[in-house]
């Protein structure tokens, strides 16, 4: 049963189960304890009885030994042959007579006995060994013999002075009974008295005693537990039931609940007093709450009216902002389109002029170059503005396809390398062999890389270098595009702003190098459209490293 299941059981039922468990455990413990005590008592009684019987048999033996000289006077035949009674014969005979007239069994045992009937069994042999070792003065146990439970008791018989005539020294000498002497000394163990007593009577008495004790204990235990159960019912469960009914009444909305003084206990009275205080506090709180709810409802209604007016105003502002933004985008697109046409014509006429006739002098050649270069730079600016206006208007779409970054890098190199040669800049491109095919928008990725390389060329003086490296990220899920230059570098304070629209590094740079400040912002927009990122590491006077992290599989709109 889980904890939730136990929580669904009534308290009175739990008390009943606990009391029942206590009754069972107590009865089992009482039966075990009573049986153990009765067993120990029975064993002690049998041991004491065995001692008495052994002492009696030993007394007979000693009596016969003490009066052996008088018996010997009348125990010889006319031919001088001994045929009287000695202690062994008398003791064995009395033991046999005792055995025949009772349920007890008596036996005299010894190692290498003169009579084969006195040969010890395993239990008796163990007793004799213990006696000879001096480890004990008696030996007993409860055992099963021939399927019957019996008590076995063995007591030692020690050699006394009157025993030496037949069993003393010299060993091997023939005594009056015709047997060789054993060579024993005073105090030696000459044998043992073995008693066997049936336990049927004692066992029945033990069982009767156990049954009586169990009945008495059970009765007393049941009475005590019944009293405890009734006391718990009156003192605990009944008051708790009243409190439960009060809680249910409160749950139903009736807060006018009050408990009178209880006769159960001081603790329950304290609990009921606290409950009454809680109910009164809840009633007061509920009354105040209704007033507060009404006030708050009125305030909320007024607030909602204000919010509704503000929402309407905000919608109007947003509408005007959208119109203004659309107007701006349309204006920029229109102006960019209108400016691109004459600029394209200027670039075409400049290229035609350079191809049809040579400049008359160096000034004319420089003028032609300036016209063509500035026209191309202006066209690039207009294209950036037009593309940014498309992004703002949401008209720019992704064309995701499988592309080879090597092909893209080749096209970029074709555009950038002539510019590098004119400016005296070393340009290199390296593509790692493990760069995979990627799913991306070819033109947008080309635009990003071409813009980064063009910026690097713009801000790198003659004699410097620009390097394009494409490699696979260690994680294997991205491609890294690095554009490294040895140009003027970017101040740390400006590195966080250069990807914003219409922002350049500083005013001095903007005056020296032309540009709108949209190139990097547009590159950032394109990279993030793919789910990638762009960053820069730079140091003034030492150059910059722009890094594009491009996912192998670009996210698709």
Image (tube, grey):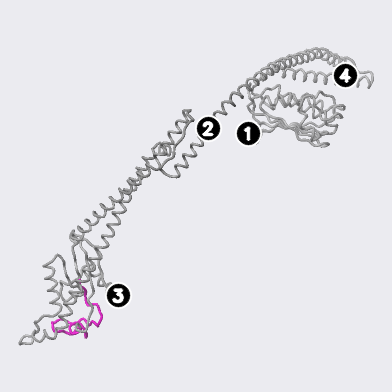
Residue 45: name its quadrant: bottom left
Q: Earlier in the sequence, mark 1 or mark 2?
A: 2
Front of the two marks 3 and 4: 3
Q: In the rendered structure, are the residues bearing label 1 and label 2 in contact, judged by CB atoms less than 8 Å apart?
A: no
- Gap in angstroms between the C-alphas marked 3 and 1: 89 Å
Residue that mark 2 sits on: 282
Q: Residue furthest front?
A: 261
Q: Earlier in the sequence, mark 3 or mark 4?
A: 3
Q: Tell me: residue 170, above or below residue 516.
A: below
Residue density around tag 1, few if under 14, some if 14–19, many if 20 or more, within 10 Å? few
Q: Tell me: residue 96, above or below residue 284.
A: below
Residue 519 percent location from the top left of the image = 77, 24
Q: Earlier in the sequence, mark 3 or mark 2?
A: 3
Residue density around tag 3, few if under 14, some if 14–19, many if 20 or more, within 10 Å? few
Q: Residue at x 77, y 15 (%)?
A: 328
- SS state under label 2: helix
Q: In the rendered structure, are the residues bearing label 1 and label 4 in contact, judged by CB atoms less than 8 Å apart?
A: no
Residue that mark 1 sits on: 476
Question: Is residue 348 left or right of 234 when viewed as pictured?
Answer: right
Front of the two marks 4 and 2: 2
Front of the two marks 3 and 1: 3
Residue that mark 4 sits on: 371
Span highlighted in magenta in the image? 164-193
Q: Earlier in the sequence, mark 4 or mark 2?
A: 2
Residue 337 percent location from the top left of the image = 78, 13
Residue 47: name its quadrant: bottom left
- Gap in angstroms between the C-alphas marked 3 and 2: 87 Å
Badge number at residue 134: 3
Question: Is residue 82 left or right of 442 when viewed as pictured?
Answer: left
- Gap in angstroms between the C-alphas marked 4 and 2: 88 Å
């Amino acid at each position: 049963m889980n904890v939730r299941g136990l929580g669904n059981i009534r308290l009175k039922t739990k008390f009943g189960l606990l009391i029942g468990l206590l009754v069972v455990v107590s009865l089992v413990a009482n039966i075990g304890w009573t049986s153990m005590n009765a067993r120990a008592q029975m064993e002690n009684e049998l041991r004491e009885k065995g001692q008495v019987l052994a002492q009696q048999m030993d007394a007979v033996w000693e009596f016969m030994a003490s009066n052996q000289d008088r018996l010997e006077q009348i125990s010889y035949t006319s031919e001088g042959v001994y045929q009287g009674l000695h202690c062994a014969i008398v003791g064995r005979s009395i033991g046999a007579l005792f055995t025949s007239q009772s349920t007890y069994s008596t036996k005299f045992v010894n190692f290498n006995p003169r009579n084969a009937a006195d040969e010890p069994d395993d239990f008796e042999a163990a007793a004799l060994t213990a006696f000879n070792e001096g480890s004990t003065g008696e030996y007993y146990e409860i055992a099963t013999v021939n399927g019957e439970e019996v008590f076995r008791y063995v007591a030692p018989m020690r050699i006394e002075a009157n025993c030496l005539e037949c069993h003393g020294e010299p060993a091997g000498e023939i005594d009056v009974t015709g047997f060789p002497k054993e060579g024993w000394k005073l105090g030696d163990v000459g044998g043992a008295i073995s008693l066997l007593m049936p336990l049927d009577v004692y066992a029945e008495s033990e069982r009767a005693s156990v049954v009586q004790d169990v009945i008495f204990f059970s009765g007393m235990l049941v009475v005590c537990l019944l009293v405890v159960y009734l006391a718990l019912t009156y003192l605990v469960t009944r008051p708790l039931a009243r409190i439960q009914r009060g809680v249910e009444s409160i749950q139903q909305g009736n807060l006018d609940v009050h408990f009178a003084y209880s006769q159960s206990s001081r603790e329950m009275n304290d609990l009921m007093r606290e409950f009454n205080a809680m109910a009164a506090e809840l009633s007061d709180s509920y009354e105040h709450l209704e007033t507060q709810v009404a006030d708050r409802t009125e305030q909320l209604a007024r607030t909602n009216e204000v919010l509704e007016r503000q929402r309407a105003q905000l919608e109007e502002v947003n509408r005007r902002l959208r119109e203004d933004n659309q107007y701006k985008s349309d204006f920029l697109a229109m102006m960019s389109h209108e400016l691109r046409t004459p600029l394209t014509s200027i670039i075409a006429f400049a290229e035609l002029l350079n191809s049809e006739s040579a400049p008359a002098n160096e000034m004319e050649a420089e003028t032609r170059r300036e016209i063509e270069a500035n026209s191309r730079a202006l066209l690039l600016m207009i294209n950036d503005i037009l593309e940014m206006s498309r992004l703002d208007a949401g008209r720019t779409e992704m064309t995701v396809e499988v592309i080879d970054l090597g092909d893209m890098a080749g096209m970029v190199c074709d555009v950038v390398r002539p510019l590098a040669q004119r400016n005296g800049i070393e340009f290199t491109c390296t593509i790692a062999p493990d760069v995979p095919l990627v799913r991306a928008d070819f033109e947008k990725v080309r635009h990003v890389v071409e813009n980064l390389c063009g910026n690097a060329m713009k801000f790198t003086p003659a004699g410097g270098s620009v390097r394009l490296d494409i490699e696979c990220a260690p994680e294997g899920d991205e491609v890294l595009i690095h554009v490294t230059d040895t140009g003027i570098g970017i101040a740390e304070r400006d590195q966080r702003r250069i990807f914003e629209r219409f922002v350049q590094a500083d005013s001095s740079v903007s005056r020296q190098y032309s540009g709108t400040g949209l190139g990097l912002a547009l590159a950032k927009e394109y990279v993030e459209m793919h789910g990638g990122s762009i960053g820069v590491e730079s140091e003034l006077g030492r150059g910059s490293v722009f890094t594009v992290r491009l996912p192998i599989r670009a996210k698709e709109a």
